[in-house]
Amino acid sequence: MPSSRLVAAAFGAVTLIGTALSVAPASAAPVNTGIAPITQAGGGLVEQAQYYGPRRYYGPRRYYGPPRFYGPRCVWRERRVWNGWRWVIRPVRVCR
């Protein structure tokens, strides 16, 4: 005898498949209501293409060499440095 879970799963699957096959969308109904059809906003690919337009491709990014920094590459700055026993302020060469 099958378990109740198996019976419930089979009943749910049959119900979903039967509902999906028997229900037709409203736009496919053979009855004419006599009013103009209502279009959805952005419904088709043509409308989307007309709205967004063609995408432009500018090609690969250009490389113009390393970035240019203005000023010297290395400078001397006053920094706090640990000398082994305590913190002292000394000039330190800082390079980019």
Image (tube, rainbow, N blue to C red):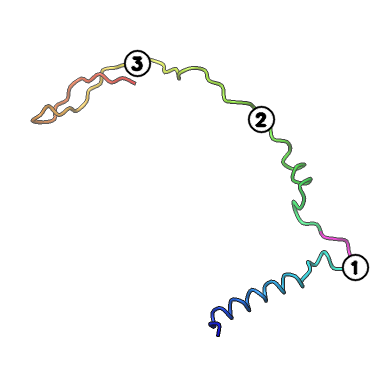
Residue 68 % position (x, y): 44, 17
What amino acid type is highlighted by mark number 3? Arg
Direction from residue 78 to residue 56 in the image, left or right = right
Which image quadrant for residue 85? top left
Using the image, determine if residue 64 lies above or below residue 31: above
Mark 1: amino acid: Asn
Residue 2 position by quadrant: bottom right
**Most frequent secondary structure within the magenta stretch:** loop
Residue 24 pos. (x, y %): 79, 68
Image coordinates of residue 51 in percent, x first then y, are: 74, 43
Q: Mark 3 points at which residue?
A: 73
- Judged from this view, the residue extending furthest toward the front is 1
Foreground of the two, 4 or 24: 4
Q: Quadrant of residue 52?
A: top right
Q: In this view, does 60 lie to the left or right of 92?
A: right
Tell me: residue 47, above or below residue 53.
below
Q: In which quarter of the image is the C terminus?
A: top left
Category of crowding for the residue at label 2, using alpha-carbon neighbours closer than 10 angstroms: few (below 14), some (14–19), many (at least 20) = few
Specify the segment rendered in magenta.
34-38
**Does residue 50 lie above or below 6 as drawn?**
above
Residue beneath disc 2: 57
Q: Tell me where residue 58 appears, x and y as whole percent.
A: 64, 27
Q: How many marks?
A: 3
Q: Distance between the residues labelled 2 and 3?
A: 37 Å
- Residue 32, disc: 1
Q: Which amino acid does label 2 sit on?
A: Tyr
Looking at the image, is mark 2 or mark 3 nearer the viewer?
2
Q: Was residue 69 drawn as part of the magenta stretch in this picture?
A: no
Q: What element carries label 1?
A: loop
Q: Alpha-carbon distance for marks 1 and 2? A: 46 Å
